[in-house]
Amino acid sequence: MQIVYKYRSINSKERKHTIKKMSLAVVNETTVTTFVEDMKAFENCVKECFEMLDVDGDGVLSRSELREGFCKLMSLGHESSKKEKIDHLFDTIFDRFDEDQNGSIDPREFKCLIRELMFAMGRGFGNSPVLVALEIDSLLMKAVEHEFGQI
Ligand SMILES: [Ca+2]
Ligand SMILES: [Ca+2]
């Protein structure tokens, strides 16, 4: 007698939907600063982020490209109540870091931007450990992975 396992294999595409995009981590200021000060790890990460955000691949980030990836990188979430606040914050950041005022962020400007934002986040945490929910692709998650020697 032959048994047919008709439904044995699970479609891998369906499985992907169940994978969680958030992760809990404990961070403090040192987590962030150690990462930013590790030139090699930090630069690799910045480069990776830049390429991810540069959707049209022209080597610079337009306002909309940066806006699109901003929430993800900063792990700000997507709640609509925060949207206005984030828009305002985003505009301020974009204008400040677009040093040559050409309306786009080049890799050098991007690195300064990420560096400052990371330090600002670090100061926000202070020295006592803080439990945060992080998006897998966020910069803080990279800092956490760095702390555990994974990158
Ligand atoms: Ca671009
Ligand atoms: Ca620029």
Image (spheres, rainbow, N blue to C red):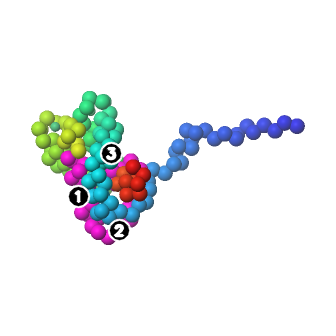
Is 27 a magenta residue? no
> Over which residues does the magenta segment extend?
112-140
SS label for mark 1:
helix
Q: Is residue 137 rendered to the left or right of residue 14?
A: left
Does residue 30 lie above or below 111 as drawn?
below
Q: Is mark 2 within 8 Å of ligand 2?
A: no
Q: Earlier in the sequence, mark 2 or mark 1?
A: 1
Q: Quadrant of ligand 2?
A: top left
Q: Residue furthest left?
A: 100
Name the mark nearer the viewer: 2 or 3: 3
Of label 2 and label 3, which has the lower sequence position? 3
User: Neighbour class for label 3 at 10 Å: few (<14), some, many (≥20)?
Assistant: some
Residue at 35% x, 54% y is: 143
Residue on which disc 2 sits: 129
Look at mark 3 in the image and give the residue it sits on. Answer: 45
Q: CA distance from mark 2 to mark 1?
A: 16 Å
Q: Residue at x 73, y 37 (%)?
A: 6
Residue 20 x, y percent position in the rendering: 49, 51
Look at the numbered disc 3 and give the secondary structure of its residue: helix
Q: Residue at x 34, y 38 (%)?
A: 52
Helix or strand or loop: what does disc 2 sit on?
loop
Q: State the residue lying farthest toward the bottom.
A: 128
Q: Which residue type does callout 2 highlight?
A: Pro
Above or below, 126 relative to 11: below
